[in-house]
Amino acid sequence: MRVRVRYSKLGKVRFISHRDGARLWERALRRVAVPVAFTEGFTPRPRLSFGLALPTGAESTAEYIDIELVEGTTIDGADADRCLLTELSAALPIGMDVQVIAPLESDAGTRRKSLQDEVTSTTWELWGPGVEGSDFEAIADRLLAADELPLERERKGRRHVDDVRPLIHDLRPDETGTRLVADIATVGRGVRPAELASLAFAGTARADIRVLRTQQWIEQDGERREVLSLPVTVNALARGLSA
Amino acid sequence: MDRPDDSLWAQLEPLLARVQKPARYIGCEDGMGSPDHRPDKVAWLLAYPDTYEIGLPNQGLQILYEILNERPDAVAERTYAPWLDLDEQLRAAGLPLFSIDTHRPAGDFDILAFNLAAELVYTNVVNMIDLAGAPLHSADRTDDDMFVVVGGHCAFNPEPLADFIDVAVLGEGEEVVGEITAVLHRWKGAGGHDRQAVLRELASVPGVYVPALYDVTYAEPTPGFTQGPIAAVTPNRADVPATVHKRTVADLGDWPYPKRPLAPLTEVVHDRLSVEVFRGCTRGCRFCQAGMITRPVRERPADQVRTMVADGLRQTGYNEVSLTSLSTADFSDIEPSVLGVLEDQQAAAPTGPDGMSLGCGTTINLPSLRVDAFTVGLAGQVASGRRSGLTFAPEAGTWRLRTVINKLIVEEDLYGAVESAFSQGWTRLKLYFLIGLPTETDDDVLGIAELAKNCVKIGRRHTTRASVTVSVGGFVPKAHTPFQWFGQNTREELQRKVQLLRSATRRAGNVNVKWHDPAATTAEGVVSRGDRRLGAVIERVWRDGGTFQEWGEQFDLDRWTAALDAEGLSLDWFVFRHRRADEVLPWAHLSAGLHHDFLWDDWQAALAESGIEDCRWTPCYDCGVCTGYGIEHVVASPVPPAGGSQGTGQDLSNGAAVPLHLTFTPVDAPSRRATDMAGAT
Ligand code: SF4
């Protein structure tokens, strides 16, 4: 059986790397005695699969991990679910909180796509000391109106210029007008939030721009929907922590 | 609690976005307390003067952190040396050294206490005092300034740091930190005036050394040198003890710490649970300061070991535990302990062997083991799955030299252990050696190559992948050891011996040689047996940008020689010169309990190639520690553990009869620091 977990990474823990996060999950799962399945072989590894890596320094209210449980394990009823949720949150550091746990239907025979391959776009908020008072409306309009947004990147030691305009689905200010909200594609090479920041706020040091991932989206029957959506209350709590 | 107005977090956060590995500075570990600051409490900032990755696993610091936070009159937080990038950012932003628990400025603390585990970190100590905002020199500090304290193994010769520190603590800290707290708590309660008076009061606490209360005078320069030896060290007040003695905890069973081990959020050098099974070692290796200064042997009760492992694994979620000590196979109950731990972990596993929950696939790490058939077997029991590498430490290449250093391993037994390791599936061996030992000849160095080649030959009988890595470190004589009088090999001599070893192994397939940079060994030698005249040298090296000297890319011997020149001091004097029996050594007024005569006689016995037995299982030879301090060994077994030891009363003149004693840790354990080994062939 597989379960999918949505969790947050807010506050001081934003400075731990994706790889460190994986180690923390292994320890937390052992502390809570979750019966995680192992890979075969000489050095068995727990069957955990992490979603799209979050850059070190970025925060998120939409991180995912898929956990393969040992055969025969069932998580039945809302109570068991809720208790695991609280226990895992307690075993993870402050700022990493489990928000949703959902069993994944087993599609017998077919190999599931990994979380990373399923996700097609993500939503981010950008703000920070370096961009306070910016006219986010105007920035959004400028970038969205552009025919092309060439971005110079290095790949394998060589310079390439990519047009990232098609990868930006939408840009808008948030309700408070103090953050820029961006929907960006993750398929192909995608565009990283830091790259978006350099286009939106040219001349501002990257370290002075904070980024928060708020959603990860998958396509289903032509519609986009969140991988796991969040109960409204949790969202509010999470946003409070991040502020 | 963490009151936001006391925290620098808001100012630090933008800086952390600009540095490498920001997770070093965020705290938030499992096991972190919630430090409760109140004005009347004595606030300790426990500092490790190297990076977080190296400092976090330090058990001494974790133990004191917990003991202090349990006291109603104390609060403790931690700090580690900020890497160069953050150091620069902090100075540019005008921000001080901070605690990583609640990100308070260092200046909010009453005590800045360093754990000194190595000499080359001294420039980091100076840098951190400066970054903390305290006057660099203890003489310039006033009632409002913090007290700078050092402890740990290097504090047994704190003289090179005497200018910068207020207090050095000798020996084990469990009890003495409470006594220091009590003195400062009373002092703070009375208004905190008259720093000099409270320093004198601290000096009356056993184990506490206040350098400012002792005057050091020097003799005329010795012919051929620009400086002379110490003439005398004298207390400058009547109520100050002439000799400061170390502190020793009588029974380790009374101190089951850490009870809440710190599990870091980012990878550190020893990323596993550690449980100390005993303290002290009386095997008597003559080069080993750790063994000499931690006598006698005190074992932890086996059932306590078992409980601490079970609790620690449950709390941290680790699936690996290290049973630590200076020689873990010597623990009386090692075999039942290991079996007991494995049994507990099986019982804690509710899901069977294919699950990951507690207990599944727990590995036990046994560092510093002897190597004999017994211990290789033990290693086989605990190494579930991967058997990539084992580390043995014969320390010297020939039996003759091993009798000099009292590391009494015969070749036949080494080869027996090697055979046993390869036959049980290990494919890589790492052998540790010292070069530059007293009486060493080129034959001894070439003996290292011989040993390594023979080990490969044995391995080839079991696997074509058999390989041996030889790691050589240059020997640095240490205070309070029988070799404290020995003149260290010069950099050139160490270099020559490394080359000798390299050419002797060049054509031997599957023998790799790694060596520690002889230049760094030389600088370590400067401070290892240095005196107060080196304070100015350390300060110059620091001002010249010489921090993180344990890190190869930051180290430059020229900085040290230039600083020595500028102060009219020389390497020859501090490092390469043999000391005479009647010389006043810089630490002569500090005692680890070892009689001067015992150390000198043992030095003479070394030169006569004569070994000494382990007093844990054979009659006491009165080194001075137990007799002087009224303590004794706490050892469960009256006889040496299976596998034998040099303490079994065998005829030491006949090497073949003596079983071997080697140490090993998995080869794939992360290297202690990036620069441990300067190069490889
Ligand atoms: S006093 Fe005796 S028993 Fe104690 S450590 Fe020294 S030699 Fe060994």
Image (tube, helix red, strand yellow):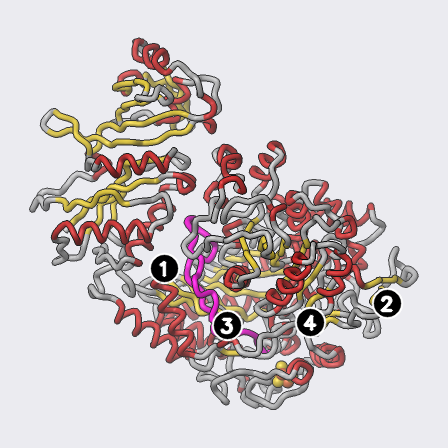
Q: Nearer the viewer, residue A118 or B430?
A: A118
Tell me the distance, in whole angstroms, between the alpha carbons under discs 2 and 3: 39 Å
Q: Which residue is mark 4?
A: B206
Q: Nearer the viewer, mark 4 or mark 1?
A: 4
Mark 4, secondary structure of its residue:
loop
- Residue B561 location in percent, x, y? 76, 48
Q: Residue at x 77, y 70 (%)?
A: B589
Q: Earlier in the sequence, mark 4 or mark 3?
A: 4
**Can the viewer see residue B28 in this picture?**
yes
Q: Residue at x 57, y 61 (%)?
A: B73
Kind of residue at disc 4: Pro
Tell me the distance, in whole angstroms, between the alpha carbons under discs 4 and 3: 19 Å
Kind of residue at disc 1: Tyr
Vertical arrangement, residue B483 with respect to residue B164, above or below: below
Vertical arrangement, residue B547 with respect to residue B436, above or below: above
Co-location on one chain, circles 4 and 1: yes
Q: Which residue is mark 1?
A: B318
Q: Which mark is residue B255?
A: 3
Report the image quarter containing ligand 1: bottom right
Kind of residue at disc 3: Trp
Q: Earlier in the sequence, mark 2 or mark 3?
A: 2
Chain label for disc 1 = B
Kind of residue at disc 2: Ala
Around disc 3, counting alpha carbons within 10 Å, would you say few (fewer than 14), some (14 to 19), or many (20 or more)?
some
Tell me the distance, in whole angstroms, between the alpha carbons under discs 2 and 4: 22 Å
- Residue B633 location in percent, x, y? 56, 83
Task: Magenta stretch: give its range.
Answer: B256-283
Q: Earlier in the sequence, mark 2 or mark 4?
A: 4
Q: Which residue is mark 2?
A: B232
Q: Nearer the viewer, residue A157 or A44?
A: A44
